Amino acid sequence: MKVRRLLDPLVARVKYAGALGELQSVEDTYKEIWRIRQAEYPIILIDIISAKSRNPCLTLYLDLRNYDFAPPSATLLTMDLRKRLLPENVPAVVEGSESAKGHLAGTPQTGLWFCSPGFYEYHDFYYPMDRWELIRGTDMGQLTWIVNQACNLVDRQKI
């Protein structure tokens, strides 16, 4: 996923460290829903946890290159991290989820992306008039809320 660099690299790294710290501070609270798998600037990989097996079932890929000047870019990856999920091979646990209807979009070229406030693709491509600047300072602009929003689109009971 290609996201334009807008922030000074030093500022971007400070913002990234703050966002990662936010997630790490609440990770124990959400340990049955998600866990940080790997974090290396500008990417954070988060495993979404199955409610049945308590094992990771999908990985959320977050690109925080310009956070919080711009929202994070996000997609879902296969568990082996080798490829992005494409719309035609999205598992039924995502596609069949009631909460996911209308909140996931994508093409074979771009992969899957989240059509929901708080995600880069939503604000930049899908609803450019729904401005990130208006939610950035609210709960919806917090990275924890954004991660939970993505996890809520996966029916973890079916996995």
Image (cartoon, grey):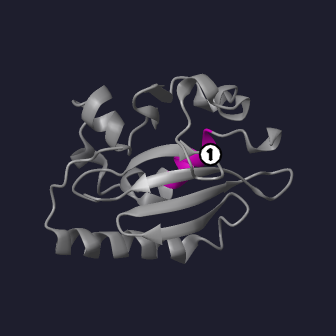
Reply above or below: 22 against 139: below
In the rendered image of this protein, does residue 48 appear above or below residue 118?
Answer: below
Q: Where is residue 112 drawn, in percent x and y? A: 49, 33
- Inspect this view and state whether residue 115 appears: no
Judge the density around disc 1: few (<14), some (14-19), many (≥20) Cα neighbours within 10 Å.
some
Q: Amino acid at mark 1?
A: Thr
Secondary structure beneath dot 1 equals loop
Provide the residue span drawn in magenta.
Answer: 147-153
Q: Position of residue 57 (x, y in %)?
A: 72, 49
Q: Residue at x 25, y 57 (%)?
A: 66
The majority secondary structure of the magenta stretch comes to helix
Which residue: 69% across, 32% down? 91
From the viewer's side, name the closer residue of 148 and 79: 79
Q: Nearer the viewer, residue 65 or 19?
A: 65
The residue at 62%/43% (across/down) is 152
Q: Residue farthest to the right?
A: 52
Q: From the image, which quarter does the C terminus lie in? A: top right
Q: Is residue 152 magenta?
A: yes
Asked whether, in this view, residue 115 is left or right of residue 69, the answer is right
Where is the N terminus found, in terms of image quarters?
top left
Compare residues 113 and 103 and report the one nearer the observer: 113
Q: Which residue bears the numbered disc 1?
A: 78
